[in-house]
Image (cartoon, rainbow, N blue to C red):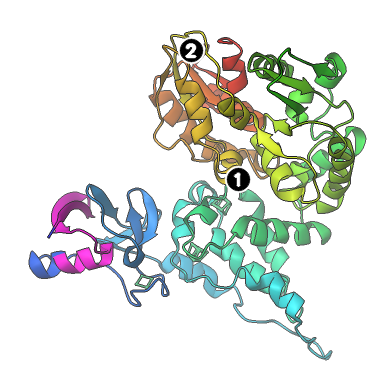
Amino acid sequence: MKWVTITVNRNGILKRYKVPEGITVLEALEYINSNYGEGILYRASCRSGQCGSCAMTINNEPRLACKTKVEDGMLVEPLEGFNVVKDLIVDRSPYYKKTQNLQNYLVWEGDEDIPKITPKDIKEFKGVRNCIECLSCLSKCPARKFSHYPGPTFMRQLARFAFDPRDKGDREKTAYFENLHNCTTCAKCVEVCPKEIDIVHRAIERLRELAFKKGYYLKNHLTVRENILKGCRSVKKEGISLLEEIGEEYTVDREKMRVALFTGCLVDYRLHHVGRSAIRVLNAHGISVVIPKDQVCCGSPLLRTGQKDLAEKLKRKNLQVFNSLDVDGVVTVCAGCGSTLKRDYREREFQVMDITEVLDRIPIEYKPLDVKVTYHDPCHLRRGQGIYLEPRRILKRIPKLKLVEMEIADQCCGAGGGVRSGRPEVAYAIGRRKARMIYKTGADYVVTVCPFCEYHIGDTLKRFIDTGDNLEVMNIVSLLDRVV
Ligand code: SF4
Ligand code: SF4
Ligand code: FES
């Protein structure tokens, strides 16, 4: 028989045990108790991924012990984000207390007949139904950790009823007053859910849409709307825009690819240098760039805050602009724009690529740069588009550059989902932890591929760490511009 060694965190003491290879963590715990005379406490019932009781933190991520195979060096701990009762048992009562007043049943008042439910209605809310209450999503939710937010599955419960025509429970109102707008749409809850429930798109954004229609919204989100209504950009114009400043086309000889650049609001109105660097770096990789001047905001700030009506208009305009181009693809330098174009522009006739996908595909030799760099994974790039290897591969190709990973590179910076604009105190509370992680790496630069992350991380570093000029945050193209 082959053996592996796993470590169990028992009330703060790490104990190592040898267990047979190929068994589940749950079987390993049983094995330890019966063969080593230990009495490790844990919860389990169904043993088949149905009851949710065996969720624990395994190698820093929440997993079901009955569905996870042991690996050598594995660390098994109680579910993060809850008080530990003993060993692997955590106190779930705050969650149950919070949900007991939720009216977890259909609410119907008045004399009218209850409407009949149709297959279309069922399709609407089916996706949020099969939760097993493992609480994995709660354990990793940054909004729950750093603010008064009851957590993803709480919002999922509300969404179950909110779109059911037989319910009159004003679920969007409950969601609004339970801080629906504290969610950064980081999608960590989606990533860890063993039932693959897409809480962000099926619960959070839909509840926000319903709440917005009924007048429950944050004042600052209306400012974003006004900006878009005035100038088709989510931020106010300050001086000349990048699109007004630059040419329409930057071609190269012996072209390997031809792409259109989607600038996004912040690059067009604030971070012109990112747009210019993107063009130079693409050209250096042998890629010609066209820049359509009538492109507008992708609609992400509206979609994330429940303002779908206006987002549709922006989408139609962008589709008209980009569908007619003769290019190999549309390139984004913003994680939020990229994930919106890929996911929400279903009618598009063009391929969307994050700039790191393109640059990684056509590698070139870079000049050496003797610096220490850490990389921050934007949520909408890592979880929104599944891109995290590409930027790291690109950075590793720069001679002399040292890439150091921070403690949790893909932890949300706090800016997304309209939280920086609508709930800045929550964005700062989440961002503070990220700033500390970055600072601890001792890096000269923190690199990312999202202007919103760039802005917010820069701001939190100044606010909480006071790094002066010693630690600079930048888009990956700004760094690459120095080595092409
Ligand atoms: S998307 Fe992120 S912040 Fe929002 S509920 Fe899920 S884990 Fe929490
Ligand atoms: S939504 Fe998913 S992760 Fe959250 S409690 Fe339900 S099953 Fe578990
Ligand atoms: S024991 Fe029921 S989900 Fe694991």
Q: Tell me residue 177's x, y (percent).
A: 67, 59
List the residue tagged with mark 1: 384
Q: Nearer the viewer, residue 168 or 322?
A: 322
The answer to whether residue 21 is magenta is yes
Query: CA gap, disc 1 to disc 2?
Result: 31 Å
Q: Tell me residue 405's x, y (percent).
A: 40, 29
32 sits left or right of 125 in the view: left
Which residue is pictured at 66% across the width and 61% down the height?
202
Q: Are marks 1 and 2 in contact (CB under 8 Å)?
A: no
On the question of residue 178 being in view, the answer is yes
List the residue tagged with mark 2: 470
**Residue neighbourhood size for the residue with mark 1, other residues' Cα within 10 Å, grouped as few (<14), some (14–19), many (≥20):** some
Quarter of the view holding residue 32: bottom left
26 sits left or right of 286 in the view: left
The part of the chain drawn in magenta is 2-31
Identify the amino acid type marked 1. Answer: Gly
369 to 319, vertically: above or below: above
Residue, far right? 230
- Secondary structure found at label 1: helix
Looking at the rendered structure, which numbered label has been put on residue 250? Answer: none
Identify the amino acid type marked 2. Answer: Asn
The answer to whether residue 360 is magenta is no
Q: Quadrant of the N terminus?
A: bottom left
Of the numbered discs 1 and 2, the one sitting upstream in the chain is 1
Which residue is pictured at 24% across the width and 64% down the height?
23
69 to 339, vertically: above or below: below
Total marks shown come to: 2
**Residue neighbourhood size for the residue with mark 2, other residues' Cα within 10 Å, grouped as few (<14), some (14–19), many (≥20):** few
